[in-house]
Image: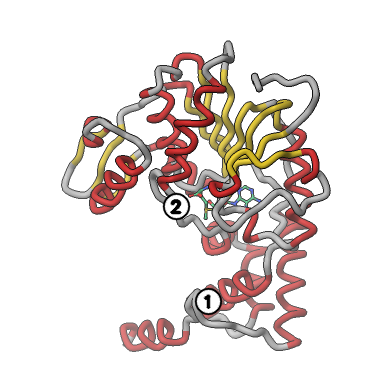
Amino acid sequence: MNHIMDRRIRAAVTTEAETFVPTELQEIEINLLLEGLYQMYGYDFRGYVRASLSRRILNRMKAERLPSITALLEKVLHDRAFLERLLNDLSIRMTEMFRDPSFFAAFRSQVVPLLRELPEIRIWHAGCATGEEAYSMAIVMLEEGLADKTTIYATDMNEKALSAAKNGAFPLKKMQQYTKNYLNAGGSKAFSEYYTTDHQYAYFHPVMDERLIFAQHNLVTDSSFNEFHVILCRNVLIYFDNDLQKKVHSLIHDSLADGGLIGLGSKESILFMPKGVQYEEFNPQERIYRRGQSSTALPR
Ligand SMILES: C[S@@+](CC[C@H](N)C(=O)[O-])C[C@H]1O[C@@H](n2cnc3c(N)ncnc32)[C@H](O)[C@@H]1O
């Protein structure tokens, strides 16, 4: 019986590719839900792009066999465990090691020479998901001989993603793709040197030990916590509406040293933001921009 129900529910779930247009009533319910999440728990999704968010909310409602979004709001206000499930749905954690290998190749050949000049290097991965991007960066810095003077801060709002990141265990079946990415990103070692395996997972060696720090930080509600020479905020801002993007760009700007570099995702840009004029295109193809000021902390 349960099997049949499950199949029906699965069939009713809307996939990422499908367009979901909420009714007027559902729009009102979604607004109330987002307001409730913010007021009760401080999670602020009010400025996220609606289409994807609405679809995910509706899918959770169906998976929980709830009759309406209002019922879902009621449940989330009273049930902390349910909140975790919903948060997990609302944060899109898709990532990979050396994602967009040409980005990491450009980082190695163009950004690393600048960083080499610094006495110490601070890098921030904002929206690091399960940590693959930060581990990739740690490997680059290690191979370039800069690990000893580098600290990598990798943050996300999603606690579950962060605890996976801290474990540094990634599905073994992904290693073939990640090895390919690593080599295309300019890696020249045997990638398997960096991990040990069991039948299910690849366990990464602690490449930078305590110099790779994972911590919770919400880009929407938390403020700047340090000044960085490099910030990677890739494939995060695409989920935010225009006003929220402006707010987060301002936070990034305040967190970036003069002459520091920001790396964005392949569909993201900084140039149309209010503070966009304060950046120069360092490598526009790879979405790397440089905060330009007269006195610079990074050599020009
Ligand atoms: C698609 S992943 C990108 C991961 C990685 N940067 C990459 O490009 O492979 C987006 C991540 O942004 C995080 N995120 C979304 N909203 C956030 C916010 N307000 N504060 C911090 N992280 C957020 C999500 O939890 C998710 O882990």
Q: At which x and y percent is residue 54?
A: 63, 74
Q: Give 264 or 13, whichever is nearer the viewer.
A: 264
Q: Amino acid at mark 1?
A: Asn
Q: Quadrant of residue 43?
A: bottom right
- Vertical side of 58 occupied by 284: above or below: above
Q: Which mark is residue 138?
A: none
Is there CB contact under 8 Å for labels 2 and 1?
Answer: no
- Which residue is at 56% across, 38% downward? 125
- Vertical side of 214 occupied by 34: above or below: below
Q: Is mark 2 within 8 Å of ligand 1?
A: yes
* Disc 1: which residue: 59
Real-space Cα separation, disc 2 to disc 1, in angstroms = 22 Å
Looking at the figure, which quarter contains the C terminus?
A: top right
Q: Amino acid at mark 2?
A: Thr
Looking at the figure, which quarter contains the N terminus?
A: bottom left
Q: At which x and y percent is residue 216?
A: 59, 39
Q: At which x and y percent is residue 114?
A: 56, 22
- Mark yes or no: residue 157 visible: no
Question: Is 80 positioned to the left or the right of 64 in the image?
Answer: right
* Disc 2: which residue: 95
- Mark yes or no: residue 267 visible: yes
- Which residue is at 67% across, 35% downward? 290
